[in-house]
């Protein structure tokens, strides 16, 4: 068989299994969504799943359909030993920068867990807490716990976009693009100006580029 056609199976419990073998059962996956958006909060989640639980369909939230994410969200929050979500708003993002805001959201999500985690598996970041942790590049694809956190964070933020923010700030198309810099969103910004939930620090280049066209 042509090797290029082979499907590479990813063991998304490799990191968890190593920790479980050391007797650590409260392993929390941590991830955030919305880092690249022009609008709205950055949202982080922390999820502790039972040791040994296998969720076959759980993967990086960006690789899943909205319907599947919603279904897995329900399964994750039902199965989880503990889970928590935290949000950092646009004005704070503007004042401390997006990376620090993302890290703060992750820290608050971990602190919101009803059970103290013994180890954190974090998607390519460090959480500012004195808890043993492992930063994993592309962790939302390689770790079931991080993937679960990415799904919980993504569904939470998407629902804010469609159920609350789109109604509060009509005209920007938030329900469709979820705050990302699509053509529709950029054109709405140039026509309407920024809303109170837009990240001003993200818009400087956008408006500078537009001014150069005239």
Image (cartoon, grey):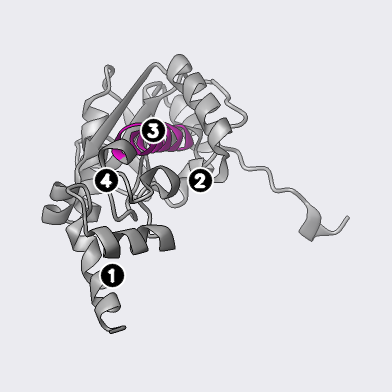
Residue occupying the point 25% across, 79% down? 211
Q: Which residue is mark 1?
A: 206
Q: Check disc 3 and report its element: helix, strand or loop.
A: helix
In-front residue for pair 34/166:
166
Q: Which residue is mark 3?
A: 159
Q: For the magenta stretch, what is the residue range? A: 147-165
Tag 3 near tag 2, CB within 8 Å: no
Q: Position of residue 151 (x, y in %)?
A: 45, 34
Q: Which residue is mark 2?
A: 62
- 27 in the magenta segment: no
Secondary structure mostly taken by the magenta-highlighted segment of the chain = helix
Q: Earlier in the sequence, mark 2 or mark 4?
A: 4
Instruction: Tell me, yes or no, if residue 80 can be seen here.
Output: yes
In-front residue for pair 15/177:
177
- Residue 40 badge: 4
Tell me if mark 4 has few (under 14), some (14-19) or many (20+) residues whose alpha carbon lies within 10 angstroms of its own.
many
In-front residue for pair 109/189:
189
Q: Position of residue 161 (x, y in %)?
A: 35, 39
Q: Earlier in the sequence, mark 3 or mark 1?
A: 3
Q: Position of residue 128 (x, y in %)?
A: 20, 42
Q: Position of residue 130 (x, y in %)?
A: 19, 36
Residue occupying the point 54% across, 25% down? 71
Residue occupying the point 54% across, 20% down? 53
- 151 in the magenta segment: yes
Tell me if mark 2 has few (under 14), some (14-19) or many (20+) residues whose alpha carbon lies within 10 angstroms of its own.
some
In the image: residue 212, left or right of residue 72: left
């Amino acid at each position: 068989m042509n090797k290029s056609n082979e499907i590479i199976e990813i063991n998304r419990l490799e990191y968890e299994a190593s920790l479980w073998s050391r007797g650590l059962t409260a392993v929390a996956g941590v991830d955030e969504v919305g880092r690249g958006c022009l609008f709205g909060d950055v949202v982080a989640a922390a999820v502790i799943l039972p040791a040994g639980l296998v969720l076959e369909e759980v993967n990086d939230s960006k690789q899943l359909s909205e319907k599947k994410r919603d279904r897995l969200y329900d399964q994750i929050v039902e199965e989880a030993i503990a889970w928590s979500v935290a949000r950092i708003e646009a004005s704070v993002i503007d004042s401390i920068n997006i990376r620090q805001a993302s890290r703060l959201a992750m820290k608050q999500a971990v602190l919101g867990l009803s059970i103290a985690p013994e180890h954190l598996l974090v998607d390519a970041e460090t959480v500012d807490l004195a808890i043993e942790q492992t930063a994993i590049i592309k962790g939302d694809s390689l770790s079931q716990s991080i993937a679960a956190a990415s799904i919980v964070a993504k569904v939470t933020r998407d629902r804010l976009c469609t159920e609350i923010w789109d109604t509060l700030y009509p005209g920007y198309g938030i329900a469709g693009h979820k705050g990302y810099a699509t053509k529709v969103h950029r054109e709405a910004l140039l026509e309407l100006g920024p809303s109170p939930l837009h990240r001003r620090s993200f818009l400087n280049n956008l408006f500078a580029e537009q001014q150069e066209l005239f």
